[in-house]
Structures are given as C-alpha cells and as structure tokens.
Image (tube, grey):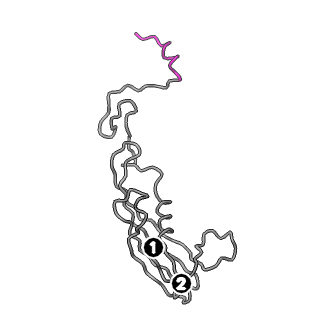
Amino acid sequence: MNLELETVFNNPGELVRFDYPLKGFDDLLPLAALPQVTGLVKNRAGIVTLEGTASVRLKAQCDRCASPLEYSAQVPLEHTLVLQRNCEDDGELILLDGYRFSPDALVWEDIVLSMPQKMLCKADCKGLCPQCGANLNESMCGCKPAGDPRLAALRELIIEE
C-alpha cells in the first residue's frame, strides 16, 4: 500500500486515512487471516504522525502442550514521520525518502515485536508429562515423579520398610 503524503506534510490539519489487508508477509507467521491495517497519517501543527491498529489472527500451537490455538491481537501503530532529521541519534523518527510512503514494513515490524514470547493455550497450561507425554490439562497420568538425579545416591541410603 502506497500513501501519497505531500498534502499532509505541506498543510497542517490535513490527514490521509488508510484501511487495507497487509499482504506479502503471510509466509513469515502462521496467519489465520491477513492482518487488517487501519489508521491515518495526520499533520498536527507541523508534526506528521501515523496512528492506527493492525488486527492480527494467528494459528499456532501451545508451547507447553502442543494443542492448537488461535491468537488474536490489536497491535497499536504510533510513529512520527519526517522528511529530514536534525541529528543521527533520532532513532524514533521514521525518515521518509520523499512524499510517497508504504507503511507495510513498518507495520509488520510492529506486529512481530508485539508477539508474545510464548504462545499458550491458557495462562495456567500444565503442559505434557515429561515421561509419558500425556496432556496434563486433560488428565493426570500415573507416572511417578523421576526426582532429581543429583540426589540418586541419597535415595539409595533410604531404608524402605
């Protein structure tokens, strides 16, 4: 998606709205549907900002129990756009190369950075039994806890009756 921003940069109070499906990145995450990106670019007293949301739905597996899950999120988009920088240390500003701008890569970066480190089917997921592989969310297995292998020598000293 390309946005023409010349009128926005040259006229305070001007804005451009956008609403489109984000294409071209669907092979990088297991998407249930293309992310829907909505928002606007506006000039407020000479400061041009991009504001909006990206609606994301992923099909994934729980990192603890491997159950299938669907993850949904509303990713906020908030960036300041500039045509030139005053200093090189201004890393928070998005430097544009002209008035034509495609926010796709910027939106995709926001989506990836907002993803949780672990995908869980529920916050208290118990995972799988390390011995038999049973899903502990569905039922308890009959396996005996293995115990800490560093204490095996002490276990041999215990007299069982």
Q: Quadrant of the N terminus?
A: bottom left
Which label is found at residue 149?
A: none
Furthest toward the left, the residue is 138
Q: Residues within 10 Å of mark 2 (few under 14, many from 20)?
A: many
- Rendered position, 134 above or below 16: above
Q: Does the magenta run of residues contain 158?
A: yes
Q: Residues within 10 Å of mark 1 (few under 14, many from 20)?
A: many
The residue positioned 56% from the left and 89% from the top of the image is 10
**Is residue 122 among what the camera can see?**
no
Q: Could you tell me which secondary element the residue under label 1 belongs to? A: strand
Residue 105 appears left or right of 32:
right
Magenta span covers which residues? 150-161
**Is residue 42 among what the camera can see?**
yes
**Badge 1 amino acid:** Gly
The residue positioned 34% from the left and 37% from the top of the image is 136
Q: Quadrant of the C terminus?
A: top left
User: Badge 2 is on which residue?
Assistant: 43
User: Badge 1 is on which residue?
Assistant: 52
- Rendered position, 57 above or below 96: above
Place of residue 14 in the rendered image (x, y in percent of width and height, measured from the top left): 50, 87
**Badge 2 amino acid:** Asn
Return the disc, 2 or 1, that comes first in the chain's sequence.
Answer: 2
- Rendered position, 10 above or below 151: below
* Cα distance between the residues tagged 2 and 1: 14 Å
How many numbered marks have been drawn onto this rendered protein structure? Answer: 2
- Which of 24 and 85 lies nearest the eye of the viewer? 24
The residue positioned 40% from the left and 43% from the top of the image is 64
The residue positioned 42% from the left and 68% from the top of the image is 54
